[in-house]
Amino acid sequence: DADVTQTPRNRITKTGKRIMLECSQTKGHDRMYWYRQDPGLGLRLIYYSFDVKDINKGEISDGYSVSRQAQAKFSLSLESAIPNQTALYFCATASSGEGTEAFFGQGTRLTVV
Amino acid sequence: GDSVTQMEGPVTLSEEAFLTINCTYTATGYPSLFWYVQYPGEGLQLLLKATKADDKGSNKGFEATYRKETTSFHLEKGSVQVSDSAVYFCALSDHSRDMRFGAGTRLTVKP
């Protein structure tokens, strides 16, 4: 099984619909992140969490919300999806401490029509 | 805030050519620096890292040196292979804050 699992892998949804992307990890890491990837823009941070009670906004949090249900689970919600939220979304985890690497899921390709 | 700027590309090279992908950063503290690689259809995975000035990270023939004086962490490889075709991301992390990534550089290596 993958260390970081994202579901679904692909999703097409309509404008205005609510959608949730889920992420779970078996690494035992405290830190979890949600990024979106757009061509030419790299990865942009949406939200991050350093533990279950610590949620922080990233660069582009507008239109998104998150929930850290447990140390191993971090979900991303789009309350009312819009077409410019069409992107590839990645969840990542990392342990605390200096120089620790991030582990990524395989991504969720979301299309909003 | 902290940020990373990298050469966007795309970069196309012939097999066995020398590769350089430039990366510079802006940070208020003393971050750790990383290069990640993304193969088609996959998530990012760590290629190499350096945690302090003058450290050299290396892996699979790739290397990068943490240069504090020029705030740079350029990725190099002496002889690329077709299998190196991927997107490469430079990143920084201050352990007390978040992780920031560059825009990514797509590398295509032709036989």
Image: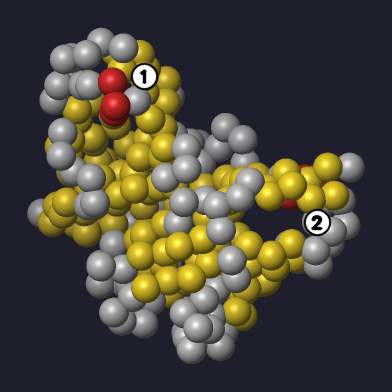
Name the image quarter holding the C terminus of chain B: top right
Vertical side of B31 occupied by B101: above or below: above
Secondary structure of the residue carrying tag 2 is loop
Q: Could you confirm whether marks 2 and 1 are on the same chain?
A: no
Residue sitting at 23 percent across and 35 percent down? A76
Chain label for disc 2: B
Q: Where is residue B4 in the image (x, y as percent from the top left)?
A: 42, 64
Task: Kindly identify which residue carries mark 2.
Answer: B80
Whether the residues at callouts 2 and 1 have beta carbons within 8 Å, the answer is no
Is A79 situated above or below B55? above
Position of B65 with respect to A103 (left or right) is: right
Residue B21, located in which quarter of the rendered image? bottom right
Alpha carbon separation for disc pair 2 and 1: 35 Å
Q: What element carries label 1?
A: strand
Q: Look at 47% across and 43% down and name the residue there.
A: A40
- What residue lies at 19% left-to-right and 27% top-to-bottom? A78
Residue type (three-letter) at the residue carrying disc 2: Val
Q: Residue A14 carries which label?
A: none
Residue name at image x 51 percent, y 60 percent: B6
Residue B47 placement, left or right of A29: right
Residue A97 shows in this picture: no
Q: Which amino acid does label 1 sit on?
A: Thr
Displayed quadrant of residue B3: bottom left
Q: Where is residue B27 in the image (x, y as percent from the top left)?
A: 33, 75
Q: Position of residue A8 (x, y in %)?
A: 37, 23
Q: Mark 1 points at which residue?
A: A111
